[in-house]
Image: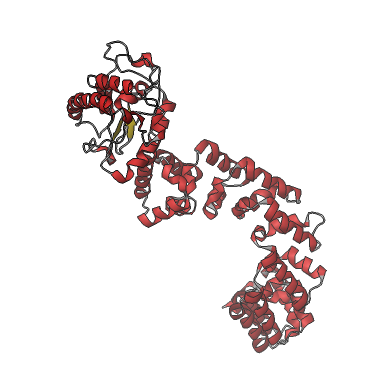
């Protein structure tokens, strides 16, 4: 029985005597264009039963109310009809008019349509007499079945006990829980009966919530497609989660739309069961609240994962690899996407690959992961293995050389061979470096293979050869030359040593801080400032 609707029409059935009514969409008016949907008889209804029904219903009850204005949807609506039951004695003496009067209080759609019932009562008397003659003249009609098999199960039976007596109460054949629903009794039953309407109301409220937060319709549609649960989300839950992320977690208001659009599921999660436990655990791993807010902004789906099922096993996995407990938080907050990776099919495969490179002792893998947590996001077959094979075959690194590269600069094995590594390697060869020299430079300073040729390698080599008048062989023995700033460090120190006619190597000139450089060559602060000018 669905009579509690506000904006949505519902099929409802007030026992067998009240039959079916269909509230038009948005509950604007009661269906007045009704037609006969089917008879109330089954194969067990005999001619005598039909005669009795005709007499009885001509005075007190309905025979059949049928079809909605929307003929295309009435069959589906009939299939959706649900009968709920209650103890018959609780409804003793409750006629259909009082029930409809109670329904009018709760439903917007039938507020002004009770007059239809009075007219219907007169028509029922005529229809009851017609049933009487139908029972006499057409005995075979009693064998016609209703098209809706679900409703036939609830039709009156001969032994249901309503043939005797003259009481004016409803002849309750089945137990009807109409009274409970109309008087706000059983919450569980009420929630089940009104679930369709609640879904519609929730969908409408969440749309208003998104518009209030500044989302446009295309963005809302995209989020609804991404997260089907949003259609059933409550605006008060979404608002509570939104306020929690802003006020407690400390995420800036302007960043919240971006976070929600990336993971709309956040607004549907229960605050106490999912969001608060995850945020508190992340806060325990981080040093400042800002780190937690930054991690959520980087990867909003981190809040949708379970602490027990994902975060705790992940922390235990990294600890087993030798990651210090003090570094666990740094890894997770620096690359929060780690929580979305499967330990068995993703992380364990990468660990096995690193172990095959000889990094399986003394917590070496843990140190690599702490230095570059993003390494865990790459594919072994598509990225890590092709890169290491290039370093072996083309660059000429030994096994120890590869281990040194991975330990000191794991970012190198994460770069694309054809787009980055090979072009840099070819440029170094064009500059005149031999294979052994390139291997030495890569081992000593791995970033040389990922530096920008135009903005980094080329200007430094040009300055080294054309301005400083030095050979490239000196760079091969000191590849960290490409690490120092060209303007602020290389050029300024070169001017100082040249002005004072000092002969020194690149390592002696650059491999020290400013104070040690001044002390080493006896420069005063004024001289250094003049050279900088």
Locate residue 314 relative to residue 212 in the image: left or right: right
Q: In the rendered view, would you say 271 is above or below 294?
A: above
Relative image position of residue 113 (x, y in whole percent):
20, 31
Res. 103 image quadrant: top left
Decide which of 336, 446 is in the foreground and name it.
336
Q: Position of residue 362 (x, y in %)?
A: 81, 54
Q: How is the image coloured?
A: secondary structure
Residue 254, percent from left and from top: 42, 53
Q: Is residue 61 above or below residue 25?
A: above
Q: Residue at x 72, y 57 (%)?
A: 349
Is residue 104 among the parts visible in the rendering? yes
Query: Which quadrant of the figure has residue 356?
Result: bottom right
Q: Is residue 370 above or below residue 517?
A: above
The x, y position of residue 42, in whole percent, is 37, 29
Asked which quadrant contains residue 409, the reply is bottom right
Residue occupying the point 47% across, 49% down = 227
| Residue 3 in view in this figure | no
Q: In the picture provided, is 72 more to the left or to the right than 229?
A: left
In which quadrant is the N terminus drawn? top left
Residue at far top of view: 165
Residue occupying the point 65% across, 76% down: 418
Name the quadrant of the C terminus: bottom right
Question: Camera-side residue: 215 or 434?
Answer: 215
């Amino acid at each position: 029985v669905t009579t509690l609707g506000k904006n949505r029409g519902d099929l409802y059935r007030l026992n067998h005597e009240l039959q079916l009514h269909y509230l038009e969409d948005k509950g604007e008016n009661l269906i007045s264009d009704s037609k006969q949907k089917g008879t109330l008889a089954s194969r067990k209804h005999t001619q005598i039963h039909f005669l009795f029904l005709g007499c009885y219903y001509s005075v007190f009850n309905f025979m059949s109310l049928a079809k909605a204005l929307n003929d295309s949807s009435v069959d589906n609506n009939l299939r959706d009809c649900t009968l709920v039951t209650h103890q018959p004695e609780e409804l003793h003496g409750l006629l259909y008019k009082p029930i409809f009067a109670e329904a009018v209080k709760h439903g917007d759609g039938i507020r002004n349509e009770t007059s239809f019932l009075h007219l219907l009562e007169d028509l029922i008397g005529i229809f009851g007499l017609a049933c009487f003659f139908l029972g006499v003249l057409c005995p075979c009609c009693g064998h016609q079945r209703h098209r809706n098999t679900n409703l036939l199960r609830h039709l009156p039976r001969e032994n249901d006990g309503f043939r005797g007596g003259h009481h004016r109460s409803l002849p309750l054949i089945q137990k009807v829980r109409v009274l409970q629903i109309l008087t706000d009794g059983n919450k569980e039953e009420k929630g089940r009966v009104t679930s369709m309407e609640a879904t519609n109301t929730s969908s409408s409220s969440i749309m208003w919530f998104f518009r209030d937060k500044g989302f446009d319709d295309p963005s809302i549609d995209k989020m609804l497609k991404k997260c089907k649960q949003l259609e059933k989300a409550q605006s008060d839950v979404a608002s509570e989660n939104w306020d929690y992320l802003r006020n407690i977690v400390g995420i800036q208001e302007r960043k919240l739309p971006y976070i929600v659009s990336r993971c709309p599921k956040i607004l549907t999660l229960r605050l106490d069961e999912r969001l608060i436990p995850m945020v508190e655990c992340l806060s325990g791993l981080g040093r400042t609240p800002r780190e937690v807010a930054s991690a959520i902004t980087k990867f909003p789906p981190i809040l949708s994962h379970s602490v027990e099922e994902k975060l705790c096993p992940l922390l235990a996995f990294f600890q087993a690899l030798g990651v210090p407990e003090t570094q666990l938080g740094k890894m997770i907050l620096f690359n929060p996407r780690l929580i979305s990776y499967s330990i068995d099919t993703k992380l364990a495969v990468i660990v096995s690959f690193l172990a095959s490179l000889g990094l399986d002792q003394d917590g070496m893998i843990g140190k690599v992961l702490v230095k570059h947590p993003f390494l865990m996001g790459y594919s072994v077959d598509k990225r890590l293995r092709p890169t290491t094979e290039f370093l072996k075959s083309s660059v000429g690194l030994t096994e120890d050389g590869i281990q040194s590269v991975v330990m000191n600069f794991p970012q190198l094995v994460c770069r694309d061979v054809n787009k980055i590594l090979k072009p840099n390697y070819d440029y170094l060869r064009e500059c005149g470096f031999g294979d052994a020299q390139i291997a030495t430079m890569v081992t000593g300073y791995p970033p040389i293979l990922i530096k920008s040729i135009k903005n980094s390698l080329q200007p430094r080599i040009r300055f080294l050869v054309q301005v400083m008048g030095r050979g490239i062989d000196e760079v091969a023995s000191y590849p960290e030359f490409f690490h120092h700033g060209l303007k602020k460090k290389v050029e300024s120190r070169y001017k100082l040593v040249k002005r004072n006619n000092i002969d020194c190597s690149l390592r002696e000139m650059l491999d020290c801080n400013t104070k040690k450089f001044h002390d080493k060559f006896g420069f005063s602060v004024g001289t250094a400032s003049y050279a900088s000018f």
